[in-house]
Image (cartoon, rainbow, N blue to C red):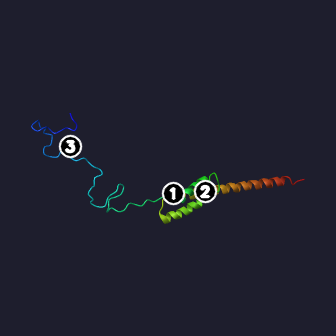
Amino acid sequence: MTYPPQPPEQGGYHDPSWPSGQPGYYEQPAYDPYAQQPVTGPPAYPGYPAAGYGAPAPVRGTNTMALVGMILSLVGLAVAITAPVGAIMGHIAKKQIRETGEEGDGMALTAIIVGWSVTGLYVLCCGGYFLLIAGVIAAGGASTGGY
């Protein structure tokens, strides 16, 4: 059998399933994806709604200051000075997000909460350390004064 099947010869057997007088599958022109298509209106690009359905929503980016503030707040667990810097950056990022409509509100809130919490813990630890040193100095001075 030859591929594609050829129409029957004239005067020979005629298959009733073979269309006669009508353009068949094999008689149609090949599909050309680069052929000029008739333009009926503005083009609709993939991923965007067709014309008349509104413009696509603008892409909103993440606020960079919120991201940096969150990172600095988390690094503040190891390096105490970066925690309050991250919290302050979180406050600034929240203001920018309200004004510009960017994303990153959760990161800014995380920066504020973690930053001020870590700062408070370090202040308490340093205060307790200074009280301990003062107590040791006071106790050491009282025991040597009785000669």
* Mark-to-mark CA distance, 3 and 1: 61 Å
The reply to whether dot 3 and dot 1 touch (C-beta < 8 Å) is: no
Who is closer to the viewer here, 28 or 115? 28
Q: Secondary structure at mark 1?
A: helix
* Residue denoted by label 3: 26
* Mark-to-mark CA distance, 2 and 1: 16 Å
Who is closer to the viewer here, 138 or 47? 47
In the picture, measured across the screen, residue 100 lies left or right of residue 72, that is: left
Q: Residue furthest top?
A: 1
Residue in the image at 27% along x and 49% along y: 32
Q: Earlier in the sequence, mark 3 or mark 1?
A: 3
Measured from the top left, where is residue 6 in percent x and y?
18, 38
Q: Amino acid at mark 3?
A: Tyr
Residue in the image at 28% along x and 61% along y: 41
Quick check: can you spot residue 108? Answer: no
Q: Amino acid at mark 2?
A: Ser
Quarter of the rendering containing residue 57: bottom left
* Residue denoted by label 1: 106
Badge 2, how many Cα within 10 Å: few under 14, some, many 20+? some
In the picture, measured across the screen, residue 83 lies left or right of residue 142, that is: left
Q: Which mark is residue 117?
A: 2
Q: Amino acid at mark 1?
A: Gly
Residue in the image at 59% along x and 53% along y: 74
Q: Earlier in the sequence, mark 2 or mark 1?
A: 1
Q: Secondary structure at mark 3?
A: helix
